[in-house]
Image: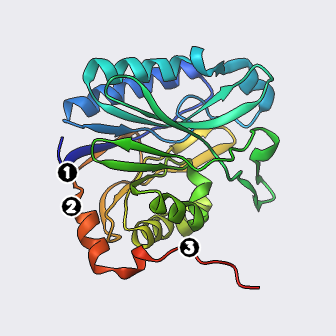
Amino acid sequence: MGNEFKVACIQLNSGRSVKKNLDQTLKFLIKAVKLGANLILTPEITNIVSLNREHLLKETYPEKKDPCLNMAKDFAKKNSVWIILGSIIVKDNNKRLFNRSYLISNKGVIISKYDKIHMFDVIISSKEVYEESSTFTAGKKIKIGQTPWGKVGLSICYDIRFPELYRSQVAGGAKIISIPSAFTVTTGKAHWHTLLKARAIESGCYVFAPAQCGQNTPNRKTYGHSLIVSPYGEILKEKMSGNGIITCKINMDQVDNIRKNMPSYQSKLLKRII
């Protein structure tokens, strides 16, 4: 496929209904194909937005039976497109819940999957408290997946605040970083753009960051502002609010050119000095 391709980032307003979220996602996948996308990304928690553990256990599925994942695999194969299902909530037979991202090939095959490592346990205000660790089982492994255009480092939302994750992915050959998110409005206004640009600059990678937006549930509102960022830290496309799609033509030669001119990308991870 060469070094050029078209990426699409879908911005969603997912809620508590898996069926409604699936229908919404499929609608935008179809639109992205019509726009000529070769790689399509969806946001974090594409299939359901909830931190109520009992509700999630009732509404979610094991990986092999998950309707959103199976829809994405079938769609990728039928339309010969690559998909990064930003994340969906899946469960296992031991009633453990995982916030999991999938890289799916244009043959409908799962190339790589990643469980969110860093849990969002944060007190934003007296009325806005998040404790993901009480709901989800954290991942333990850094994941990179191969695409026709280069390796992709998989991550999810709160991971963005841990730059060592991305430096490790770059050391493993990543040239693209996926950061699907459901950022809060408060932290989004303060840090979203700055963090994404920093991750792109320090890694010399393209950053694709599809996001949740708007009032997802009565108790949860997300920031939106899906972004496509160049390896030089330039915002190439942005979807500020509302459901929709941003697309951009990507030239992977820019990654190599920037890295040749910036010796910082060749430095090894620092060893701790005692």
Quadrant position of the C terminus in the picture: bottom right
Q: Percent position (x, y) of residue 77?
A: 32, 20
Instruction: Pick the residue in front: 256 or 115.
Output: 256
Q: Quadrant of residue 42?
A: top left
- Asked whether the viewer can see residue 171, the reply is yes
Neighbours of disc 3 within 10 Å: few (<14), some (14-19), many (20+): few
Q: Secondary structure at mark 2?
A: helix
Indicate the quadrant containing the N terminus: top left, top right, bottom left or bottom right.
top left
Question: Which amino acid does the dot numbered 3 rest on?
Answer: Leu
In the picture, measured across the screen, residue 219 lies left or right of residue 13, that is right
How far across and how far down the image is residue 119, in percent?
71, 51
- What residue is disc 2 on? 253
- Comparing labels 3 and 2, the label whose residue is closer to the camera: 3
Disc sitting over residue 56 in the figure:
none
Disc 2 residue type (three-letter) = Asp
Frontmost residue, 86 versus 256: 256
Label ID, residue 269:
3
Q: Residue at x 61, y 64 (%)?
A: 162
